[in-house]
Image: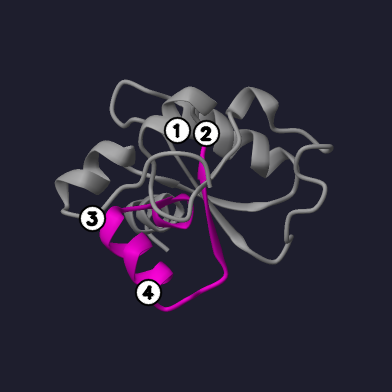
Amino acid sequence: MSDAVSHFQRKLDHETDSWDLNELLKARECVVVVDARSSETYREEHIPGAINLPHRQMNDETTRDWDRSALYVTYCDGIGCNASTKGALNLSRLGFRVKELIGGIDWWKRDGYPTDSGER
């Protein structure tokens, strides 16, 4: 496999975009969307159905009851925020299958997808 093919395949193995995430959610795939930002920010606005676990709180105890067979997609505000990267790293270290939503909630909204507010 060429270096370019290998590079782009690895990138797609670990990242997703709003369209692909929406398609997974519509297909009711075993995917869990994780808002890795603060609880306050999550309450203001989040992707519908997302759960909130700030990246600093991700550990064996807080994820003990999570489905190990699911795909977890982390997100944050978008460009300029790395909470989703930190969350994806934490969940990967804990043994979960993870992708990061590129562009975060900002690109989710730019692509025309809805958001919710309040607690889930």
Q: Which numbered mark, 2 or 3, is in the foreground of this view?
A: 3
* Residue 103 visible to the viewer: no
Q: Residues within 10 Å of mark 4 (few under 14, many from 20)?
A: few
- CA–CA distance between discs 2 and 1? 12 Å
Q: Which numbered mark, 2 or 1, is in the foreground of this view?
A: 1
- CA–CA distance between discs 2 and 4? 22 Å
Q: Nearer the viewer, residue 76 or 95?
A: 76
- CA–CA distance between discs 4 and 1? 23 Å
Which mark is on residue 62?
none
Examine the rendered structure and indicate whether residue 11 appears above or below residue 40.
below
Q: Which residue is mark 4?
A: 26
Q: Which residue is mark 2?
A: 36
Q: Mark 3 belongs to which amino acid?
A: Tyr
Which mark is on residue 113?
3
Residue for point 28% across, 27% down: 79
Q: Which residue is mark 1?
A: 43
> Disc 2, disc 3: CB below 8 Å?
no
Query: Mark 3 vs mark 1: which is more N-terminal?
Result: 1
Q: Mark 4 belongs to which amino acid?
A: Lys
Query: Mark 2 vs mark 1: which is more N-terminal?
Result: 2
Numbered disc 1: secondary structure: helix
| Relative side of 59 to 56, left or right | right
